[in-house]
Image (cartoon, rainbow, N blue to C red):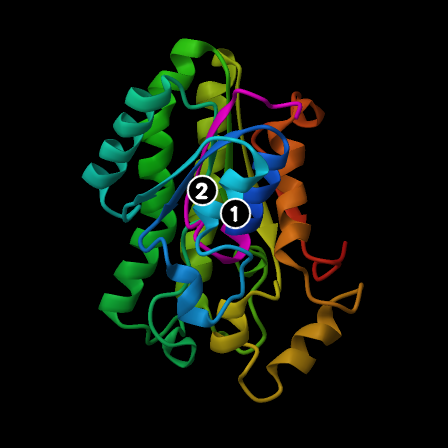
């Protein structure tokens, strides 16, 4: 419970990797705000959880938890969410920007042909959503002279996939890396660290449906992973724990690859 009495917002937390982040923070003593565009999002992909909502799962650990439905690509909605949390608990110490994903079909995400609609929605949900959330919490973190921000990018932003899919998503996530580095420089003097995690292939219900179900894709991805297994959501949440606890006190502006060896140096 080393982070007892801290308050965190985790976006896209009603399932998948965001759920794992929320549960890990709760076990560290953090009071958690579960944000998602739909607090029942885990049902969409058939994910199995232990209670009827992630809010209930987190509350059962023994910390305070509320759920707020808001679209991170809506700047006004994000600002209202942050105002609500500050009004209720008085401070926000940790922000984990997890919300995002590809808009549109994987087979239509190529660099030369992605539609204007899918491109715009992907950039809005991943890059702009991250920016809006960071901007909304920055002032209160600056006032308290402490804060931890963890953004989410992707291995797709660091190296192109062999067949060129996910180009729009990768472009948005590459922007997240650059934004993270600039924000870290700006907020460092206030005792705020800003970092990002970069997963590769994570065995979530969402990816099982949208990507791993495509013919040959699971075998293709496993062949690229040195550890020869897909990551679990909890594997990725360990990176968040590093950045928000004392272990990461002197680390800022960094992008941590959590890829099982997909990227080789």
The secondary structure that dominates the magenta segment is: loop
Q: Residue furthest left?
A: 76
Picture disc at residue 57: 1
Asked if residue 203 is positioned above or below residue 212 in the image, the reply reads: above
Picture disc at residue 97: 2
Q: Compare residues 195 and 247 and report the one nearer the observer.
A: 247
Q: Is residue 122 left or right of residue 167?
A: left
Asked if residue 253 is positioned above or below residue 178 in the image, the reply reads: above
- Tell me how far mark 1 sits from mark 2, CA to CA: 20 Å
Classify mark 2: residues with Cα within 10 Å, few (<14), some (14-19) or many (20+): many
Q: Position of residue 23 (x, y in %)?
A: 57, 43
Q: Quadrant of the N terminus?
A: top right
Q: Position of residue 170 (x, y in %)?
A: 47, 60
- Say whether residue 3 is magenta: yes
Q: Is residue 96 left or right of residue 128?
A: right
Q: Is residue 13 left or right of residue 131?
A: right
Q: Position of residue 258 (x, y in %)?
A: 67, 51
Asked if residue 181 is positioned above or below residue 158 in the image, the reply reads: above
Q: Residue at x 68, y 60 (%)?
A: 231
Q: Which residues are magenta?
A: 1-18
SS under mark 2: loop
Classify mark 1: residues with Cα within 10 Å, few (<14), some (14-19) or many (20+): some
Q: Compare residues 26 and 80 and report the one nearer the observer.
A: 26
């Amino acid at each position: 419970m080393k982070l007892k009495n801290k308050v965190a917002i985790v976006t896209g937390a009603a399932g998948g990797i965001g759920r794992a982040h929320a549960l890990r923070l709760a076990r560290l003593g953090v009071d958690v705000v579960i944000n998602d565009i739909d607090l029942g999002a885990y049902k969409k992909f058939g994910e199995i959880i232990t209670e009827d909502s992630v809010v209930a799962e987190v509350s059962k650990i023994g910390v305070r938890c509320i759920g707020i439905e808001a679209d991170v690509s809506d700047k006004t909605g994000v600002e209202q969410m942050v105002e609500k949390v500050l009004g209720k608990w008085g401070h926000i110490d940790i922000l984990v920007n997890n919300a995002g994903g590809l808009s549109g079909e994987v087979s239509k995400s190529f660099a030369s042909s992605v539609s204007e609609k899918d491109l715009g929605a992907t950039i809005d949900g991943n890059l702009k959503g991250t920016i809006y959330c960071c901007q909304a919490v920055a002032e209160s973190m600056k006032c308290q002279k402490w804060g931890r921000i963890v953004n989410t990018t992707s291995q797709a932003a660091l190296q192109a996939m062999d067949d060129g899919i996910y180009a729009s998503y990768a472009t948005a996530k590459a922007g997240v890396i650059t934004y993270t580095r600039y924000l870290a420089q700006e907020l460092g003097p206030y005792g705020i660290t800003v970092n990002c995690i970069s997963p590769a292939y994570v065995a979530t219900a969402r990816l099982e449906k949208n990507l791993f179900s495509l013919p040959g894709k699971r075998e293709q991805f496993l062949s690229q992973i040195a550890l020869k297994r897909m990551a679990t959501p909890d594997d990725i949440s360990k990176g968040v724990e590093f950045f928000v606890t004392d272990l990461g006190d002197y680390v800022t502006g960094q992008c941590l690859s959590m890829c099982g060896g997909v990227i080789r140096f």
